[in-house]
Image: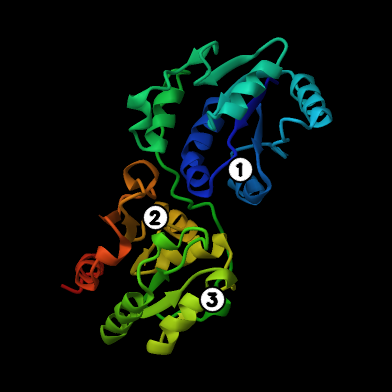
Amino acid sequence: MPNILVIKHGAFGDFVQALGCLRAIRKHHPSDRITLMTTAPFEALARASGYVDDVYIDVRPKWYKIGAWVKLRGWLNAQNFAFVYDLQNSKRTSVYFELFSPVPDWNGIVKAASYSVEDGPARKAKHVFQALVDQLSVASITPITPDDLSWIEADISSFNLPARYVLVAAGCSAKHPAKRWPVDRYAQLCVQFVAKGITPVLLGTNDEADVNTAIKAVCPEAIDLTGHTTLFQIAVMARGAVAAVGNDTGPIQMIGPTGCKTLGLYPGFSNPARHGPLGANVTTIQRHTMADITLDQVWHQVSRACGLV
């Protein structure tokens, strides 16, 4: 039984978008053993998908950690991989190519690879998912469609969600405050939802508690689930939501593929055309700054998605 290696480290949105590619690789190698090389945050998601047989956690050693590199090289060559699909296509994974002796069949941007793809401006202009689809087609893996995450299961009964609710992801990484739409506008948006009989459900980690606390102070009817949801639970909640709205966050990346009517808000320096969430019902609004996105613009998009206009 041949051993197959797939490399995909992250980031989160890119990993979720690569799940459709993992599914296609699994279908292409139904009887082979597939190992995913990734980072710790994505292990549970990868294992639950059923698309891989094993997960190898790559600690991504610093360049000066000679012992770690020797250990990694030994592991890579001991597995006797027959084929490597490099879905990360980074400088690091190009170095991993050089660690093999002999080099197995390899699909990626490494020029010396047996199934190489050009890493030029045309590829970098595509959505990351489409770039991977085109890459895998060189290795005769087609067709590939986004994964709808329908295999994700989670218990959400303890949240006691109402019949009509909208998911709201008003936060984002503290490192990127410019990606946040003003909290007062999220609060007013939630008030408008309540007036239409739709309960806002606030998502986020404890690092974003201040944002959701401010929203709930203005809209007490909102359900604040800050720090109480897993990504799996968010995907399940998305299936029953009338819509979702949020910034460039992990929850929005999980919600979009489920088919939920999703609106993502982006500043000018972001690139939703390349990194935006997948999904048949995903739309985006992008302006120079997040403050340039008006409440009316967001309400028009979301209310239309919910069938309120």
User: Quick check: 124 above or below 106?
Assistant: below
Compute the Cα span from label 1 to label 3: 34 Å
As drawn, is 225 to the left or to the right of 306? right
Answer whether labels 2 and 3 touch (C-beta < 8 Å). no
- Residue furthest to the left in view is 309
What amino acid type is highlighted by mark number 2? Gly
The residue that mark 2 highlights is 256
Instruction: Work out which quarter of the rendered image holds the N terminus and state it.
Output: top right
The residue that mark 1 highlights is 50
Give percent across and percent down for residue 302: 26, 67
SS under mark 3: helix
The residue that mark 3 highlights is 209
The reply to whether residue 202 is in sight is: yes
What amino acid type is highlighted by mark number 3? Ala
Give percent across and percent down for residue 182: 35, 72
Place residue 297 in its image quadrant.
bottom left
Mark 2 or mark 1: name the one nearer the start of the chain: 1
Decide: few, some or many residues near mark 2? Use Cα within 10 Å; few <14, some 14-19, many ≥20: many
Give percent across and percent down for residue 33: 68, 28
Mark 2 or mark 3: name the one nearer the start of the chain: 3
